[in-house]
Image (cartoon, coloured by chain):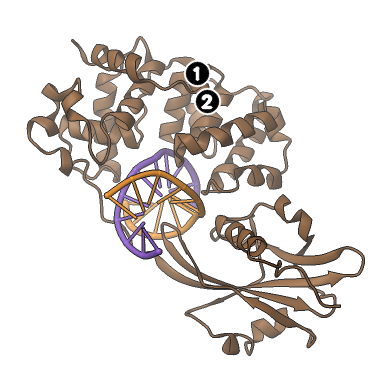
Chain colours: A brown, B orange, C purple
Amino acid sequence: MNFTKLLFSWYDLHQRDLPWRRTKDPYKIWISEIILQQTRIEQGLNYYHRFMDRFSTISDLAAADEHDVLKLWQGLGYYSRARNLLHSAKEIVKMNQGLFPSTYAEIRNLKGIGDYTAAAIASMAYDMPYPVVDGNVLRFFSRYFGIFESVDKASGKKAVLLLARGKMDLANPGKFNQAIMEFGSLQCKTGSPDCHACPFRENCFAFTHEKVVDLPVKSKAIQPRKRYFNFLVLIYKDPENGEIIYLRKRKENDIWKNLYDFPLIESSGPVSQSKLIQTAEWRNLVKTKKAVIRKRSKVYQHRLTHQLIFARFYVVHLGKKPVNEFTPAVLKNLDKFPVPRLIEKFLSDAAANGPNVLADHRR
DNA sequence: TAAACGTGGGA
DNA sequence: TTCCCACGTTT
């Protein structure tokens, strides 16, 4: 049996029924691919449904506020994916009257769409023979062909891409691509691949040479940078509106761009409370003498790929209305703002731990 | 081209 | 609990 036949008979038995597999709509495939890029299917599924309910067409998305797109994306991480989706939707409306482009080159040109996603959309929506090379395909083919170059380097990926082109079923590019990724994901797994029941075992280099555990080869992980965040959760009890909390929109080219957190004093190492309140930054943020530190949180550790963040939250009740550049929000509207997981976690802890420290009980 | 970009599953 | 790792694109 040839490669495609083996693959398809495996796929016909094992494929999962997922909404984006039942459509040829390039918009739906696009959205699902972007969500699934760095996200597991189980988690991505919910986001996909919510996204489609909220933005059912490209024009709907193009007309959205970035704030709302980020809010919908909250918790998924890699927020540039959401910003790029919006950017490209606007581009499609402007350049192509809202019609999704239909050539590989045009698709590939959209912001947020790289080699993998362009191939996925072109093959699944239009049945064009562009092989997808995602993490699953890299793993499977590096084992199957015995590729010992690092698959997270350009040369290793290129080698796999060339071999994938040779295997591609030109009659069914969409099905071939879905099948090969599903195979890598479910059968040729990272940890303990099910070689015993694998239809390709006889021709698999790694299996026949006992190199399954050695492949694929990856470059070594990088050391995360340590950062120390001292957040100031400034609360002012407004006579009319109740507690106001001050949020900061992150603008710089840094993590969580365009999401919200709190006024922040970043330090080069851990800082004690007594040292912190002596700093110029603290005095600049807490201008009034009538301020009370209501709570100092535990240190939250938040690990990103390249950063290890140690965060502490100081809940400060201000005695008088502050004048500052931050975004005021009443407590009940807090959940309208897109925030990173770290902030979400702090807020839910604050709400869960007895009397809400964010509420001002003084009279 | 190497580094940046987040989160969560699972060991 | 902590640690390690997976997942594509951009710059």
Compared with residue A56, is residue A242 higher up or lower down, i.e. above or below?
Answer: below
Q: In the figure, is residue A46 to the left or right of A218?
A: right
Q: Quadrant of residue A321?
A: bottom right
Identify the residue at the far front of this view: A354
Q: In this view of the protein, can residue A55 be seen by the observer?
A: no
Q: In the figure, is residue A229 to the left or right of C7?
A: right
For mark 2, give the secondary structure: helix
Count of number-bearing discs: 2
Q: Quadrant of residue A146?
A: top left
Q: Residue at the spot x=70%, y=28% of the render?
A: A59
**Do marks 2 and 1 share a chain?**
yes
Mark linked to residue A202: none
Callout 1 environment at 10 Å: few (<14), some (14 to 19), or many (20+)?
many
Q: In the figure, is residue A321 to the left or right of A283?
A: right
**Residue under label 2:** A29
The image shows residue A121 at horizontal and vertical percentages of: 48, 25
The image shows residue A107 at horizontal and vertical percentages of: 51, 28
Q: Which of disc 1 and disc 2 is earlier in sequence? A: 2
Q: Quadrant of residue B3?
A: bottom left
Compared with residue A356, is residue B10 higher up or lower down, i.e. above or below?
Answer: above
Foreground pick, A322 / A255: A322
Q: In the figure, is residue A84 to the left or right of A136?
A: right
The image shows residue A218 at horizontal and vertical percentages of: 25, 48
Q: In this view of the protein, can residue A44 be seen by the observer?
A: yes
Q: Chain of mark 1?
A: A
The image shows residue A298 at horizontal and vertical percentages of: 54, 73
Marks 2/1: CA distance? 7 Å
Q: Residue at the spot x=71%, y=52% of the render?
A: A335
Type of amino acid at the residue the image marks with label 2: Ile
> Which quadrant: the N terminus of chain A?
top left
Q: Are marks 2 and 1 in contact (CB under 8 Å)?
A: yes
**Residue under label 1:** A125
